[in-house]
Amino acid sequence: MSKYEKKPEPGDLIEISRGLYNHWAIYVGEGYVIHLAPPSEHAHAGASSIMSVLHEKATVKKDQLYEVVGNDEYCINNLLDDNYKPRPVREILRDAHSFLGKERPYSVFSQNCEHFVTELRYGKPHSRQVQDAVRTVAAGAGATLGVGIIAYAVATFLGSRDKQKETQ
């Protein structure tokens, strides 16, 4: 989605494409978002922003949406609205503001920026990009294992054929 297709409403989840991963924020009104930001997370970090995986702490910040997005693409993505009822906007905003300036534990797998904003909106932490990454790794491992099994079976079959030729 282009940057300006739809104006976000307070409580909307904002997904920002950083290339290798997506950063998430929650829109709180008047052009501002609140987001969980490890030290390496900022709009112009480029490839170095992937270093956020090394951090164990992140800070909750309130910034203007355009500053967090920079030159990247973003969209409104209330990804779990079909699964969960969003919390009342007043509660989302109250809780989001209560975390401002606080340092929180950070883990790319269990306590990242997407977990933070989905917990604010739905009351349940969730990270689709972590689930997608796990599925991709599992599929890759499964494919590698499958190729290995097939290669072993072919080698065994060809090896047994070669042994048959030797004994004839």
Image: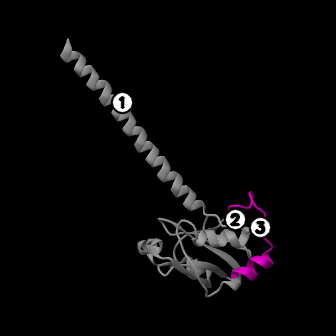
Q: Which mark is residue 54?
A: none
Dot 1 or dot 2, earlier in sequence? 2
Query: From the viewer's perspective, is 164 left or right of 41?
Result: left
Q: Nearer the viewer, mark 1 or mark 2?
A: 1
Alpha carbon separation for disc pair 1 and 2? 47 Å
**Where is residue 158 shown, x and y percent of the image?**
28, 25
Q: Are marks 3 and 1 in contact (CB under 8 Å)?
A: no
Query: From the viewer's perspective, is 80 left or right of 89?
Result: left
The residue shown at (50%, 76%) is 56
- Magenta segment boundaries in residue numbering: 79-96
Query: From the viewer's perspective, is 114 left or right of 95?
Result: left
Could you say whether the residue bearing mark 1 is in a helix, strand or loop? helix
Dividing the picture into quadrants, the one containing residue 32 is: bottom right
Q: Which residue is mark 1?
A: 153
Query: From the viewer's perspective, is 92 left or right of 77?
Result: right
Of the 4 image quadrants, the one containing the N terminus is: bottom right
Of the 4 image quadrants, the one containing the C terminus is: top left
Image height of 64 relative to 118, above or below: below
